[in-house]
Amino acid sequence: MKLLKDILLLFLLIFSNIISAETIVPNSDHEQILQILKERKEKFSVYTQSLDDATGIFGLKSKKDLKNSQKYLVEIVRLDNKLIDVLNRRVDFKGFETINSNYKQLEAERKVGELLDALKLTDSRINQQNLKIEELKSIVRSRTLLSVFFGLFLLMQLIKIYRKHNFSRK
């Protein structure tokens, strides 16, 4: 009974680990990604606006316009790098989750194997004990039968002696 409880507990742990690994998502990373994307969208809007700006002579772009556009591009690249760092951290976390989940699954499978081996060993011991019980029952039956025959033989001998003794008196 305890073995069955252990096996059920083990399967429960396996499935709960699989479910929890799927549902755990670092919220701070998710929020940070959304914030970076929002910032990037704003910066890109400012950058596209700066491309349309032409404050130079005859409606051409001035050096200042080009520097502003370049500054916005640098900010966008910094945000992209920050986004890549967060995504890499998230991928690393998912990799860790996968490795951890695989380890837990292997550990659970090992435990199930051990429990099954213990169950087989217990089953074989029970079978051996049942064979011994049957053997002992057979021995008891044969001894009981032998005792009955011996008792009958003894009774017949006593009757024989009694008759001899009674006949010799007459």
Image (cartoon, rainbow, N blue to C red):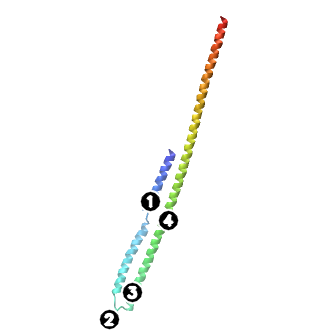
Kind of residue sitting beneath label 3: Asn
Q: Which mark is residue 20?
A: 1
Q: Characterize the local packing of mark 4: few (<14), some (14-19) or many (20 or more) Cα atoms within 10 angstroms.
A: few
Rounded to the nearest whole Å, what is the CA distance between mark 4 and mark 3?
42 Å
Tag 4 or tag 1, which sits nearer the N-term? 1
User: Among all residues in the image, which is located at the extreme bottom?
Assistant: 57
Q: Residue 96 got which mark? A: 4
Q: Which residue in the structure is indicated by mark 2?
A: 58
Left or right relative to 160: residue 111: left
Residue placed at 37% from the left, 92% from the top? 62
Question: Which quadrant, please, contains the C terminus?
Answer: top right
Percent across and percent down for residue 97 are 48, 63
Quarter residue 60 falls in:
bottom left
Residue type highlighted by circle 4: Phe
Pointer 4 and pointer 2: residues touching (CB < 8 Å)? Answer: no
Q: Residue 100 vs residue 155: left or right?
A: left
| Few, some or many residues within 10 Å of mark 3 (<14, 14–19, 20+) | some
CA distance separating discs 1 and 2: 64 Å
Disc 2 to disc 3: CB gap under 8 Å: no
Look at the numbered disc 4 and give the secondary structure of its residue: helix
Is residue 13 placed above or below 32 in the rendered structure? above
Q: Say which element carries label 2.
A: helix
